Amino acid sequence: MDYATLSRISVKHLTVMHVLLMTHSVTATANILCVTPSSVSKALAQLKTQLNDELFFRTGNQLAPTQYALSIGPAIHNVLSNINGIFQQGEFAPETFTGTLSLSMRESTFELFAPQLGSISQQLSDHAQLVISTKEQFSFEALLSGKIDFLLLPHDISQPPTHSKNLVWKAILNDEMVCLMNHHHPLAKGELTIENYLSYRHIRVIDKDLAEPYFEQTLTQRHGARNIATMVADFGSAALMCQHSPYLFTCSKRWAETALQGKGLVAKPLPFDYGQVAYSLVWNTVSLNNPACRWLHDQLVGDTAKI
């Protein structure tokens, strides 16, 4: 270990780098760290020298990280999380917490978990924030680099949400899948068979992290591929399209029963064995060094029994 080099890089340097990777702004970083912009610039200049890389280059009003800066982001997050765990010992008191907790999820997941998230938010102090982003904004890479604390998403149990050795996942809510159609649909009053399921066109929700769902692979191998008529960005849009077309929409039963967009649609069990599906919580292994993250983890895992 090169102790001489390590002695020239402080926690302040790593913290500045970590926050810059999130904000892409010297001013915003200075505000978060409660220091002057010149102090941030000085720390960044020292890091550039120590790491022999530009780290950021200016594009418009923002700083864009170099490829090297992006590559070291997860390691810096791990180091800071471990150091934070050393200093943050003891019981966590949500009513006195003044920091930020963050999650990312699809809009369909938010609709299902909104009551629990509302309850969690109300337990925090008036000076704390619970930030909920979309999975399209922040996904697995954001977990690795520390931009978010948790990711909450539905998936096939046979298809783990991530294979990253640094990320952990736990299924916290079981579900099943149904086929939705409008109440005027020719299949609305009869039994849904695999033949008529495949004879109609379908709506599919785009997921950039999942090229082909496990249920889709199983269906194609055993019975044949669906004919996709349209692809949309979210579940709400898919349900609305379903209301105004003869297309079928395959989705979470829990979401269909909860979401306003699903009201009035007819739900049928899928006519084939597609395995098990669930909602899982995903987190970085080092995140639970933070007592606030441990508390949020326990709240989410425990509160699912109420859904």
Image (tube, helix red, strand yellow):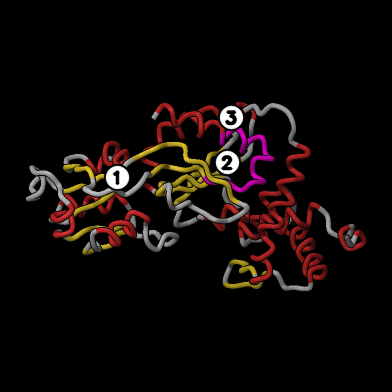
Q: Which residue is mark 3?
A: 125
Crowding at mark 1 (Cα within 10 Å: few <14, some 14-19, many 20+):
many
- Element on which disc 1 rests: strand
Q: Which residue extends farthest right?
A: 4
In the image shown, does 95 or 109 lie closer to the viewer?
A: 109
Q: Quadrant of the N terminus?
A: bottom right
Relative vertical location of residue 143 with respect to residue 85 in this rendering, above or below? below
**Residue 286, magenta (yes or no):** yes
Q: Residue at x 67, y 55 (%)?
A: 19
> Which dot marks residue 107?
none
In the image shown, does 42 or 273 lie closer to the viewer?
A: 273
Label 3–label 2 contact, CB within 8 A: no
Is residue 205 in view from this perspective?
no
Taking 298 as reference, is 113 left or right?
A: left
Q: Which residue extends farthest front?
A: 222
Residue 15 image point, x, y percent: 73, 53
Residue type (three-letter) at the residue carrying disc 2: Leu
Nearest to the eye among marks 3 and 1: give it.
1
Residue 11 image point, x, y percent: 80, 52
Q: Which residue is mark 1?
A: 177
Residue 215 image point, x, y percent: 33, 54
Residue type (three-letter) at the residue carrying disc 1: Met
Query: Mark 3 or mark 1, which has the lower sequence index?
Result: 3
Occupied quadrant, residue 291: top right
**Residue 48, magenta (yes or no):** no
Label 3–label 1 contact, CB within 8 A: no
- Element on which disc 2 rests: strand
Q: Residue at x 45, y 51 (%)?
A: 134
